[in-house]
Image (spheres, rainbow, N blue to C red):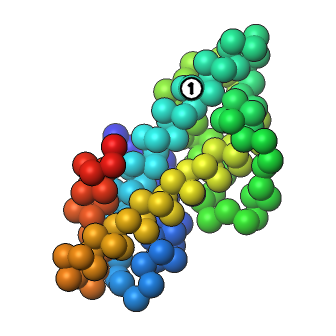
Amino acid sequence: MNVELPFAPVDTIIRRNADDLRVSADASRELATRIQEHGSALAIDAAERATADGRKTLMAADFEVETVVDKDDLELPVAPVDRIARLEIDDRYRVSMDARIALADILEDYADNVARAAAILARHADRRTIIDDDIETYFSLFE
């Protein structure tokens, strides 16, 4: 699978939750892949909501978001999030800018939760580096 999301913002998200821990490139890659999978699944659900409402344009409300944050407050870039949203949905759908920003916000919160847990797992393993196994362990425990 080609990962649409650049690793640098994902690395930044992990680091802001890691305190003094280092972050491996493999951990950033693993989390970027998981973010993409989650975002794609959310877009499928949003497309179903839009279809039920007789629309072809995904709106922020289709992602169950009432208030859309300012895109400048997000670490994740909106363009790759737009591509993630379109991975598994039909080409007939459009994704509004508010929906892209809402999805980026959801995915960033998702990434923060995973990164926080991965940091705890790395410390528990008495390591100074968050690695991809920490990300994988989180998902094996909580999903």
Residue 110, percent from left and from top: 51, 54
- Is residue 39 visible in the rendered image? The answer is yes
- Is residue 25 visible in the rendered image? The answer is no
Query: Is 9 left, or right, of 71 in this rendering?
Result: left
Could you tell me which residue is drawn at 75 percent across and 24 percent down? 57
Query: Is 70 left, or right, of 131 in this rendering?
Result: right
Check the image and name the residue furthest to the bottom.
Answer: 20
Could you tell me which residue is drawn at 63 percent across and 57 percent down? 77
Name which quarter of the figure residue 117 lies in. bottom left
Task: Give neighbour class at mark 1: few <14, some 14-19, many 20+ (Cα, 10 Å).
Answer: some
Residue marked by disc 1: 45
Could you tell me which residue is drawn at 49 percent across and 27 percent down? 88
| Above or below: residue 111 compared with residue 64 | below
Residue 134, percent from left and from top: 27, 64
Q: Amino acid at mark 1?
A: Asp
Could you tell me which residue is drawn at 50 percent across and 35 percent down? 40
Q: Quadrant of the C terminus?
A: top left
Residue 55, percent from left and from top: 76, 16
Q: Quadrant of the N terminus?
A: top left
| Above or below: residue 83 compared with residue 135 | above
Query: Is 82 left, or right, of 59 in this rendering?
Result: left
Name which quarter of the figure residue 131 lies in. bottom left
Residue 119, percent from left and from top: 36, 73
| Above or below: residue 91 compared with residue 96 | above
Q: Give the total of numbered labels.
A: 1
Helix, strand or loop status at disc 1: helix
Query: Is 105 left, or right, of 19 in this rendering?
Result: right
Residue nearest the viewer, comparing 31 with 94: 31
